[in-house]
């Protein structure tokens, strides 16, 4: 048992990515609830910068780019620099959000007395089983069990930083009711491409043009080259195209997308979501809002080949059945899990969610 009085300076090591970080917010919230006077620091990579202002219960953010540097020399240099700086801060506790021996050794070299994480990661002082059959938020929260403190999963949470009206005003949006946010892209993470998670864009066009007949639709593009609206796409006048923006997500009444970061961001703001799942195992990564007070509709047809993207295949990047050069492929070549989702059932689900607003 780790004495509660020993923990005054906590380092959370969770470098990426957006959706994964949202699923880690119950860990942060429980640390703050049990150690209200401790300083809590997050070690993050640049991929998390857009999300940082919306995270609760953190005292400091330290950015570390070592693992994502392409140059071996630069990676080593940044890692040595980071370890040197972190040792001076004299952390009592490290909470590792990655199952990776590198981060276990990293925390040890930072001279952190207590190092918590999942079994299979070397250099930890305390570890728990990685239960691949539980929801990711419950799995993450279990990392704290060796502390012997009360733990409660109240769902994912993010804080709003600006009133809804001000967000619309800043974005030149005059409509403030029945705002439907749609993000038809996603599946892009550092070093990986999983666009097989996407529903066909032509289906989204049909949905967008139908919904926008009596509601305002904010159609979000991503920041990556393969997350742009195809040229020649035509939409109704009530469709507003914007680059993905967390403030705008927080101002939507309903949010629709696949299994990707913006889905979980919307849920953490308490926004009803419609999630289109295919290759991912929705039982473990479905949206969860604070205290389960918000309705989320999940469309997952679940053919015999789904889910193919799970904690085992996600980690097995060398498996040629699924992976090639960082791209996750449909091993049947059919994309049946996404193609079997119909426009009609998506429209019906949107109506159900928006009618309750």
Image (tube, rainbow, N blue to C red):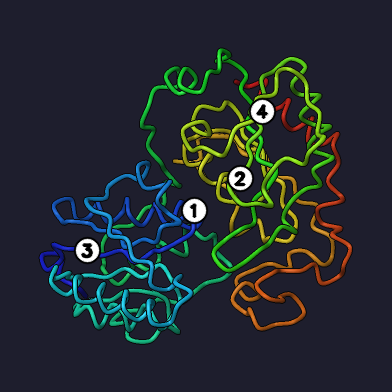
Q: Is residue 245 left or right of residue 109?
A: right
**Which numbered mark, 1 or 3, is in the foreground of this view?**
1
For the residues marked 1 and 3, what is the alpha-carbon distance in whole angstroms? 21 Å
Task: Identify the secondary structure beneath mark 2.
Answer: loop
Q: Is residue 342 above or below residue 77?
A: above
Report the quarter where the C terminus lies. Answer: top right
Q: Position of residue 245 (x, y in %)?
A: 51, 37
Rounded to the nearest angstrom, the CA distance separating label 4 from label 2 is 24 Å
Tag 4 and tag 3, C-beta contact below 8 Å: no
Mark 1 lies on a secondary structure that is helix
Which of the two labelled residues, at mark 1 and mark 3, occupies the earlier sequence position? 3
Location of residue 98 in the rendering, given as x and y in whole percent from the top left corner: 43, 71
Name the mark on residue 353: 4
Judge left or right: residue 133 versus residue 81.
right
Per the image, the residue denoted by label 2 is: 222
Q: Earlier in the sequence, mark 2 or mark 1?
A: 1
Q: Quadrant of residue 233?
A: top right
Q: Farthest residue to the bottom: give it.
A: 122
The first of marks 4 and 1 along the sequence is: 1
Q: Position of residue 328 (x, y in %)?
A: 71, 69
How crowded pointer 4 is (Cα within 10 Å; few <14, some 14-19, many 20+) is rated as some
Looking at the rendered structure, which numbered label has been put on residue 10? 3
Total number of numbered discs in the rendering: 4
Closer to the N terminus: mark 4 or mark 3?
A: 3
Label 3 crowd bin: few (<14), some (14–19), many (20+), radius 10 Å: many
Q: Upstream in the sequence, badge 4 or badge 2?
A: 2
Question: Is 333 displayed left or right of 160 in the figure?
Answer: right
Q: Nearer the viewer, mark 2 or mark 3?
A: 2
Q: Is 111 situated left or right of 301 in this image?
A: left
């Amino acid at each position: 048992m780790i004495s509660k009085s020993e923990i005054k300076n906590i380092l959370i090591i969770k470098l990426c990515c957006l959706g994964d970080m949202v699923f880690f917010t119950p860990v942060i919230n429980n640390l703050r609830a049990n150690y209200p006077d401790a300083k809590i620091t997050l070690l993050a990579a640049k991929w998390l910068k857009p999300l940082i202002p919306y995270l609760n219960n953190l005292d400091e953010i330290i950015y570390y780019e070592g693992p994502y540097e392409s140059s071996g020399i630069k990676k080593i240099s940044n890692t040595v620099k980071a370890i040197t700086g972190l040792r001076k801060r004299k952390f009592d506790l490290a909470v590792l959000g990655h199952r990776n021996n590198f981060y276990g050794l990293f925390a040890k070299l930072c001279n952190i007395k207590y190092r918590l994480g999942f079994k299979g990661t070397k250099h930890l002082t305390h570890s728990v089983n990685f239960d691949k059959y539980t929801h990711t938020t419950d799995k993450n929260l279990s990392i704290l069990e060796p502390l012997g403190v009360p733990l409660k999963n109240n769902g994912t949470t993010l804080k709003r930083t600006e009133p809804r009206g001000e967000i619309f005003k800043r974005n030149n949006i005059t409509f403030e009711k029945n705002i439907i946010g749609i993000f038809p892209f996603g599946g892009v993470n550092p070093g990986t491409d999983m666009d097989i998670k996407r529903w066909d864009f032509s289906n989204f066009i049909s949905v967008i043009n139908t919904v926008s007949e009596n509601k305002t639709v904010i159609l979000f593009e991503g920041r990556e080259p393969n997350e742009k609206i195809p040229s020649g796409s035509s939409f109704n006048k009530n469709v507003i195209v914007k680059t993905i923006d967390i403030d705008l997500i927080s101002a939507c009444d309903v949010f629709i997308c696949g299994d990707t970061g913006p889905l979980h961001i919307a849920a953490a703001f308490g926004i009803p979501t419609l999630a289109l799942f295919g290759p991912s195992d929705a039982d473990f990564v479905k949206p969860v809002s604070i205290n389960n007070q918000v309705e989320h509709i999940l469309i997952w047809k679940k053919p015999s080949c789904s889910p193919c993207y799970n904690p085992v295949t996600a980690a097995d990047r060398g498996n040629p059945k699924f992976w090639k050069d960082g791209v996750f492929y449909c091993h049947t070549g059919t994309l049946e899990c996404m193609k079997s989702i119909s426009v009609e059932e998506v429209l019906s689900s949107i109506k159900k969610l928006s009618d309750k607003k």
